Amino acid sequence: MAFRSLFAMPVVKADDEEELVDPQAVLREKCQSKGHIESLYNKYQECNDRVNGRSKTTETCMEELFDYVAELDHCVAHSLFSKLK
């Protein structure tokens, strides 16, 4: 069983009793409200509505999704690593 113990996930426990907050989730909320990111999200939602409104289509919203997620992650990356311990 050496293989199993070699790749076991570490257990992390909080130092205190207060609830932990994921800094990435907090930063994503802040970044989502920025104008250009919000407009990319709206563009993605419009595409989803259009695709879901059709019974037969080959259109997907992958490009819109990737544009939105890439810009959101880019915004979050500016601050995220400074908040990690």
Image (cartoon, helix red, strand yellow):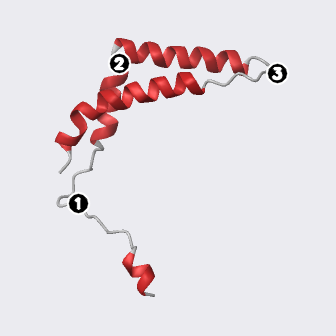
Residue 58 vertical placement versus 9 (above, below) = above
**For discs 3 and 1, the disc positioned in front in the rendered view:** 3
Q: Secondary structure at mark 1?
A: loop
Which residue position holds label 1?
A: 14
User: Which amino acid is tagged 1?
Assistant: Ala
- Residue 34 vertical placement versus 3 (above, below): above
Q: Is residue 1 left or right of residue 23?
A: right
- Mark 3, secondary structure of its residue: loop
Residue 58 horizontal/vertical position (percent)? 75, 24
Q: Which residue is mark 2?
A: 33
Q: Are the residues flagged by discs 3 and 1 in contact, CB closer than 8 Å?
A: no
- N-terminal of the two: label 2 or label 3? 2
The span from disc 1 to disc 2 (Cα, nearest Å) is 30 Å
Amino acid identity at mark 2: Ser
Disc number at residue 50?
A: none
Q: Position of residue 49 (x, y in %)?
A: 65, 17
From the viewer's perspective, is residue 34 above or below residue 6?
above
The quarter of the picture where residue 13 lies is bottom left
Q: Nearer the viewer, residue 18 or 82?
A: 82
Q: Percent position (x, y) of residue 69?
A: 45, 29
Label 2 packing within 10 angstroms: few (<14), some (14-19), many (20+): few
For this view, does 5 lie left or right of residue 76?
right
Which residue ends up furthest to the right in the rendered image? Answer: 56
Q: CA distance from mark 2 to mark 3?
A: 33 Å
Q: Residue at x 30, y 44 (%)?
A: 22
Q: Could you tell which of marks 3 and 1 lies nearer the N-terminus?
A: 1
Q: Which residue is mark 3?
A: 55
